[in-house]
Amino acid sequence: MRKVIIPVFALCMCLCSCQKVLYTHYNYDEVVYSFAKGNKTFEAKDLKKMIKSYERIVEEPKGENAVPPPGACADYAYLLYLQGDKDKAKQYFQKEYITYPESKTYIEKLMQKIGL
């Protein structure tokens, strides 16, 4: 009996300790790293690549809560602003502080600073 209980208990403990993913970043690290190690200027092709990467993070959130990671909507909004799409940028800044209310003061100041 003891030979059965110990392995079953160990299996239960292993299954209970599986960590759930809160957010999905897709290829965010690669895109940001490639930009950071380069000349640090936004060219149109780099901007489009980063926007496409962020769009997937923001529009297709996966994970336990199915929400974008903190700051992703704000980063995406700023990239949209740099591209000239101010209406959509404002929408994603608002989405950031609706999703994460603690960021509202910061996001509002940022929006005010860039003129949105």
Image: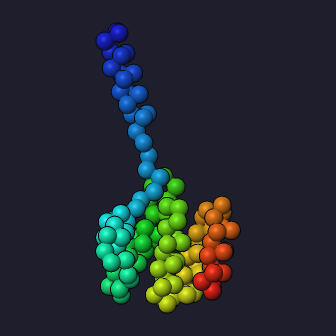
At x 52%, y 55%, the residue is 65
Furthest toward the right, the residue is 105
The residue positioned 34% from the left and 73% from the top of the image is 35
Quadrant assignment for the C terminus: bottom right
Which residue is more in the foreground, 82 or 41? 41
- Quarter of the image with the N terminus is top left
Q: Position of residue 54 (x, y in %)?
A: 42, 72
Total numbered badges shown on the rendered structure: 0
Residue situated in front as seen by the camera: 50 or 15: 50
In percent of width and height, residue 52 lies at 38, 77
Describe residue 100's horizontal placement relative to residue 38 as left or right.
Answer: right
Task: Tell me: residue 24, above or below residue 89.
Answer: above
Which residue: 38% across, 81% down?
Answer: 41
**Outermost bottom residue:** 84
Residue visible at 33% across and 15% down in the picture? 4
Q: Is residue 11 something that shows in the picture?
A: yes
State whether residue 49 appears in this view: no
